[in-house]
Image (tube, rainbow, N blue to C red):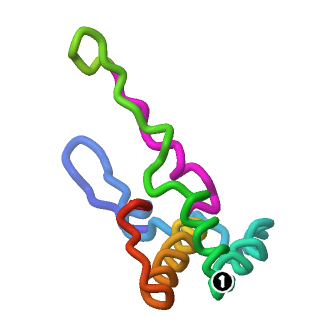
Amino acid sequence: MTVLKTKKQDIVFSALINPMGNLPKITQPKFDLLQPFRQWLDTIEIQNRKLAYFIAKLIPAQCPFERDLVLFGRIIAHIPPMCKLNPLYDQFVGLRFRALCYLVDQCGEDIKSYC
């Protein structure tokens, strides 16, 4: 602990010098219930044209909940994308991307209708 003497009062720097000193030394790792499902989604390989079509149609390219509320031609409110609150959002987007890549690379399809 470092103390700086001034004319009016002492200033203690212990919290500034060692900000992590008050935290417990050993922290318990958090258990993630969704981790096995995340890993399973990340390991799905697309090897079927019908499955790739199904995934590309099922998972939207943009969040369908994001909206601008317009009244008399003016935006009065904006509803943010709620998809980011989904804990599996990144895995679903990755799965859709793999399905679209399969359709382009393996099947030679035009995917403009999915974007």
Assign a secondary structure to mark 1.
Answer: loop
Q: Quadrant of residue 32?
A: bottom right
x 49%, y 80%: residue: 103
The image quarter containing residue 114 is bottom left
Residue 43 % position (x, y) = 67, 85
Drawn side of residue 22 relative to residue 77, left or right: right
Which residue lies at the image location 66% right of the left edge and 69% below the top edge? 24
Residue closest to the eye, 96 or 92: 96
Query: Is 55 part of what is drawn in magenta?
Result: no
Residue range highlighted in magenta? 77-89
Q: Residue at x 47, y 47 (%)?
A: 63
Please say if 62 is above or below 42: above
Q: Quadrant of the C terminus?
A: bottom left
Q: Is residue 88 magenta?
A: yes
Identify the image quadrant of residue 88. bottom right
Of the pair 97 and 104, the residue shown nearer to us: 104
Q: Amino acid at mark 1?
A: Asn
Nearest the eye: 110 or 23: 110
Q: Would you name the residue on which mark 1 appears?
A: 48
Q: Position of residue 85 (x, y in %)?
A: 57, 49
